[in-house]
Amino acid sequence: MASKVQVPAKTQESSPGFTYSALIVGWLVPGAGHVLTGRWIRGLLLFVSIAAMFWLGIAMQGKLYVPNTGDVLDMLGFAGDFGNGLFYALGRILDLGHTPVQLATADYGTKFIVVAGLLNFISAVDAHNLRIGRKA
Amino acid sequence: MFAPSHFTAVLLFATFASVVFAITQRSTPKAMVRYGAYCWVLFVGSVIVASWAMWLIKR
């Protein structure tokens, strides 16, 4: 699908400081990258959407994937979950998420958590594009 | 434990994903609202179509 956000990159940085700050902060806390670039409303909407998706997934007894299980599908699941940044770390520290998925609802929850992470990756990259002036 | 129906889960998923798609794929607020609504309708519409298709196949 064609995207309409592609505009020529600016030749200079739009703001001083560490270039990848919005990318990293946006990954750690959903929407924080947009707040860092001054887009408060966008940041708030992203935070609410991604946080709700992650925590509803946990509430549905979704599974939190762990790395190095040897199963390729588990590794892909972990890659998605890892996109949730600090939420994922908090979930692992508090031992949230259920490993054996026995209910259809829990399977939905697992997907909610993975997709929340993938959406947060998109959000963090968008914040980076705003930061470097690639997107208005 | 939160145990929504399949359709409620679809509505929640479509709403949250559409918000993120709209904000990240469009630049102006007006375009974001239109694209978000477009994504939401596609998400929910495709689920309804697929559901009816499965019902017809089962019959």
Image (spheres, coloured by chain):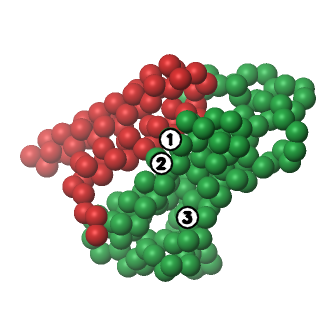
Whole-number angstrom distance, CA of label 1 to CA of label 2: 5 Å
Q: How many marks?
A: 3
Residue found at x 30% / y 75%: A102
Residue found at x 30% / y 52%: B9
Residue type, label 3: Phe
Residue placed under numbered mark 3 in the picture: A87
Residue found at x 50% / y 19%: B30
Residue placed under numbered mark 1 in the picture: A45
Query: Any idea which chain is the green one in this picture?
Result: A
| Depth order, front residue of A69/A22 | A22
Name the outermost residue toward the left. Answer: B59
Image quarter (top left, top right, bottom left or bottom right) of the N terminus of chain B:
bottom left
Residue A88: tell me if it is visible.
yes
* Mark 2 secondary-structure assignment: helix
Looking at the image, residue A12 sits to the left or right of residue A121; the answer is right
Name the outermost residue toward the top. Answer: B30
Query: Pointer 1 and pointer 2: residues touching (CB < 8 Å)?
Result: yes
* Mark 3 secondary-structure assignment: helix
The answer to whether tags 1 and 2 share a subunit is yes
The answer to whether tags 1 and 3 share a subunit is yes
Looking at the image, residue A16 sits to the left or right of residue A109; the answer is right
Up/down of A83 relative to B13, above or below: below
Q: Position of residue B50 (x, y in %)?
A: 26, 41
Whole-number angstrom distance, CA of label 2 to CA of label 3: 13 Å
Q: Position of residue A10 (x, y in %)?
A: 84, 25
Disc 1: host chain: A
The answer to whether tags 2 and 3 share a subunit is yes
| Disc with the residue nearer the chain's start (2 vs 3) | 2
Residue A124: tell me if it is visible.
no
* Mark 1 secondary-structure assignment: helix
| Depth order, front residue of B13/A43 | A43
Residue placed under numbered mark 2 in the picture: A48
